[in-house]
Image: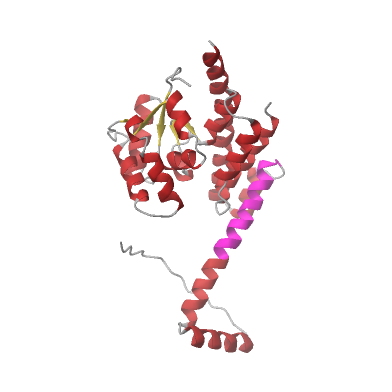
């Protein structure tokens, strides 16, 4: 199945050192890929990995009560702060409900 | 184990996949009524076409298909950020007032405070509280549920692990 994704783009200019550009030239020639495309792919891979790692750290701190929602909001914005709060809230609610259902189930199973 | 409580729960695709990945679905079906929709079954069938990890789990889930209570759901209240399948499950939960089990963070976020919604870890806590599985076994299953590539899933893992360690 072929999926066509329309991605919005924005121009972002970066100055690279001559040395780095030479290396990029070698890599792109050896791999027979376009320089820009190779940079975009690598950047997307690394960025996604780093973003996940940092958000995991943030989630760790929030779960341990070492950082508040307000502080998360200041660091990464309201959208992610709301998501962290929402997941944490449902995770706790699932535990409380699970305990209640489990106790009832235990009683029923022993009747 | 016999079906005693017959409590009703609505499952989405992620709930089926998560709970079968830790081999808990068979016991859940024995104890509870599991309601779902045809759209979820179709999603599972699409997963099952592939030979990857989720595809293999979906195949195992579909072996229990005749034990599911498959219901139709009319969409009376549409949440625009959600897919058709998720809107069906949301409306089913809203109308029947049965808890929806999902590990889909988007579904959780957009239905917040509108329906009763639990993550699949709910059943791990239920089973350990009922004395059906040991603390060690539940921690091992929780470890398997952890998705290290998903930061939201990691919050569920950490919150549940903290609680499991306190239990018993």
Where is the C terminus of chain B found, in terms of image quarters? top right
Residue at 43 percent of width and 21 percent of height: B7
Seen as rendered, the residue at the extreme top is A111
Residue at 37 percent of width and 50 percent of height: B47
Residue at 57 percent of width and 46 percent of height: B146
- The answer to whether A35 appears left or right of A75 in the picture is left
Residue A60, image x, y percentages: 67, 47
Residue B8, image x, y percentages: 41, 24
Q: Nearer the viewer, residue B97 or A103?
A: A103
Instruction: State which region is magenta.
Output: A47-65
Residue at 36 percent of width and 45 percent of height: B44
- The answer to whether B82 appears left or right of A57 in the picture is left
Seen as rendered, the residue at the extreme right is A66
- The answer to whether B84 appears left or right of B2 in the picture is left
Magenta segment, principal secondary structure? helix
**Would residue B90 be counted in the magenta stretch?**
no
């Amino acid at each position: 199945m072929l999926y066509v994704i329309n991605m919005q783009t924005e121009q972002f200019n970066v100055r690279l050192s001559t040395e780095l550009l030479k290396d990029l030239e070698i890599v792109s020639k050896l791999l027979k890929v376009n320089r820009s495309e190779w940079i975009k792919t690598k950047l997307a891979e690394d960025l996604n990995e780093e973003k996940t790692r940092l958000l995991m750290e943030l989630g760790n701190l929030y779960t341990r009560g070492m950082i508040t929602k307000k502080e998360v909001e200041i660091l990464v914005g309201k959208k992610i702060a709301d998501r962290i709060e929402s997941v944490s809230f449902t995770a706790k609610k699932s535990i409380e409900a699970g305990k209640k259902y489990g106790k009832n189930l235990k009683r029923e199973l022993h009747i | 184990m016999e079906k005693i409580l017959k409590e009703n729960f609505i499952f989405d695709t992620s709930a089926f996949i998560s709970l079968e990945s830790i081999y808990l679905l068979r016991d859940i079906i024995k104890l509870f009524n599991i309601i779902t929709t045809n759209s979820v079954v179709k999603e599972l069938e699409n997963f099952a076409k592939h030979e990857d990890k989720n595809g293999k789990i979906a195949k195992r889930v579909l072996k229990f298909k005749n034990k599911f209570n498959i219901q139709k759901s009319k969409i009376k209240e549409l949440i625009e950020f959600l897919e058709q399948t998720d809107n069906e499950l949301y409306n089913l939960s809203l109308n029947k007032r049965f808890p929806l089990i999902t590990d889909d963070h988007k579904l959780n976020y957009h239905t917040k405070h509108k329906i009763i919604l639990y993550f699949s870890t709910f059943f791990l806590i239920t089973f350990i509280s009922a004395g059906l599985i040991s603390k060690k076994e539940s921690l091992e299953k929780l470890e398997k549920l952890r998705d290290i590539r998903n930061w939201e899933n990691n919050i569920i893992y950490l919150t549940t692990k903290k609680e499991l360690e306190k239990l018993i």
